[in-house]
Image (spheres, rainbow, N blue to C red):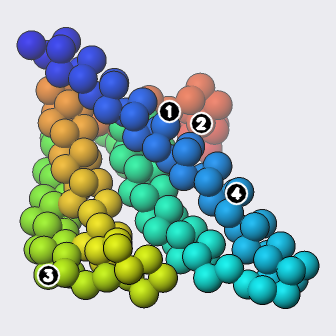
Amino acid sequence: MKAQYIRAMDALHRACLAIAGICIVIITLIIPWGVFTRYVLNSASSWPEPMAVLLMIVLSFSSAVVCYREHLHIGVGLLPSYLDERSRFVLGWIVEICMLGTNLFMLWYGIKLVQVTWHQSIAEFPIVSVGVSYLPVPIGGLITVLFIVERLMIGTFFQEPSSEAVSQVSSE
């Protein structure tokens, strides 16, 4: 069961990474188009900038969950490196419970935000609901909750420090 859950999280992780990559490629293609139409054709397209903003929202949330799973999020590793194994374990649980609370908040209130704005439309894209632009909030919260559950199952809360960082701390 645990191995199956981890494999499912691996697949979800790869999907989030792919979505982030696709978003950055599309943003990279449409922004120059907007610049071209504005300055070369003297007829600015109205859609590239709002499309880039919408894609940046998706990129941000999908990248955030990838960074969380890969231990690339902002964190202070100095304190855990000075603690014994038991204290590190307790601190890890405290941090993950706080992360769980934050992401459950994002999930719950993100859903509420999507519901409230679902019947409004985006001016540049009248067929697209404003609620769609807020969907990455609850989805990002849900995926992070799934990754938190994985981390609690495995019990690896902090990324192991590199040998270079350990040598710097021990030499001080």
Q: Residue furthest right?
A: 40
| Camera-side mark, 2 or 3 | 3
**Which one is earlier in the sequence, the residue at label 2 or at label 4?**
4
**Which one is earlier in the sequence, the residue at label 2 or at label 3?**
3
Residue drawn at (33%, 25%), measured in percent from left and top?
11
Disc 2 crowd, CA 10 A, few/some/many (<14, 14-19, 20+)? few
Q: CA distance from mark 4 to mark 1?
A: 34 Å
Task: Name the mark on residue 70.
Answer: none
Vertical side of 57 occupied by 5: above or below: above
**Which one is earlier in the sequence, the residue at label 1 or at label 3?**
3
Vertical side of 3 occupied by 21: above or below: below
Task: Give coordinates of residue 115: x percent, y percent.
Answer: 13, 74
Task: Name the mark on residue 161.
Answer: 1
Q: What residue is shown with label 4?
A: 28
- In the rendered structure, are the residues bearing label 2 and label 1 in contact, judged by CB atoms less than 8 Å apart? yes
Q: What residue is shown with label 3?
A: 116
Task: Name the mark on residue 165.
Answer: 2
Vertical side of 138 occupied by 49: above or below: below
* Residue 75 visible in image: no
Disc 4 crowd, CA 10 A, few/some/many (<14, 14-19, 20+)? few
* Residue 127 visible in image: yes
Task: Give coordinates of residue 123: x percent, y percent.
Answer: 42, 87
Q: Secondary structure at mark 4?
A: helix
Q: CA distance from mark 2 to mark 1?
A: 6 Å
The amino acid on which the numbered mark 4 sits, given as a three-letter code, is Thr
| Camera-side mark, 4 or 1 | 4
